[in-house]
Image: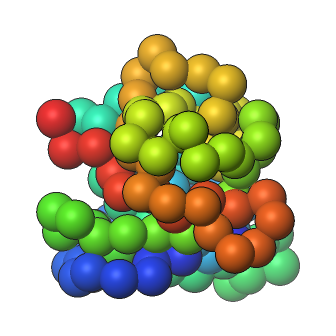
Amino acid sequence: MNFERKSGEATILPYKKTASTVFENGDPVVQSSGLLIVANASATPATLIGIIQRSVVSTDDDYASASMTEVEIPLEGTEYKAKVGAGTPAQTMVGQRYDLDANGEVNLTAQTTKVVEVVRLAQESGYIVVRFVTS
């Protein structure tokens, strides 16, 4: 799970997923041609929709269809425990904004699109607590 809500509120809304695409519960998502895909390094605060609420694998009945699935849309100030894909979390990163990587994990070595803001270090190694940037 790349993102797990730790505090704050969110709205759950249905979106169509891209057919024949694997999603992991907790993946950040954006839309491409009106369908969900996993957010990657090109995601921006304006394109990020939210966090998918279920895993989708090739053995699922609806894997090959553009079916509806639930997406958690964070409200302002909602905090998430996020998986770090690149870089090492450090206290000096608190308050800084970072990008996602190709797998939808936080990239602590890139500050181009600045999708998340570090709130604090997580207790688990390889994770950090973030908020999504809204502007």
x 63%, y 69%: residue: 122
**Position of 13 relative to 31 (above/below):** below
Q: Is residue 2 left or right of residue 11?
A: right
x 59%, y 48%: residue: 91
**Position of 130 relative to 108 (above/below):** below
x 30%, y 36%: residue: 45
Whether residue 23 appears in this view of the structure is no
The percent position of residue 111, horizontal first and vertical second, equals 50, 21
Q: Is residue 100 left or right of residue 48?
A: right
| Colouring used for the render | rainbow
Query: How many numbered circles does the render carry?
Result: 0
The percent position of residue 51, horizontal first and vertical second, equals 44, 66
Locate the C terminus by quadrant.
top left
Q: Is residue 13 left or right of residue 64?
A: left
The percent position of residue 124, horizontal first and vertical second, equals 76, 73
x 46%, y 16%: residue: 112
Nearer the observer, 52 or 107: 107
The percent position of residue 26, horizontal first and vertical second, equals 57, 71
Residue 65 lies in quadrant: bottom right
Whether residue 113 appears in this view of the structure is yes
**Position of 75 relative to 119 (above/below):** below
Nearer the observer, 46 or 127: 127
Residue 40 lies in quadrant: top right
Locate the N terminus by quadrant.
bottom right
Q: Residue furthest top?
A: 112
Q: Is residue 55 left or right of residue 37?
A: right
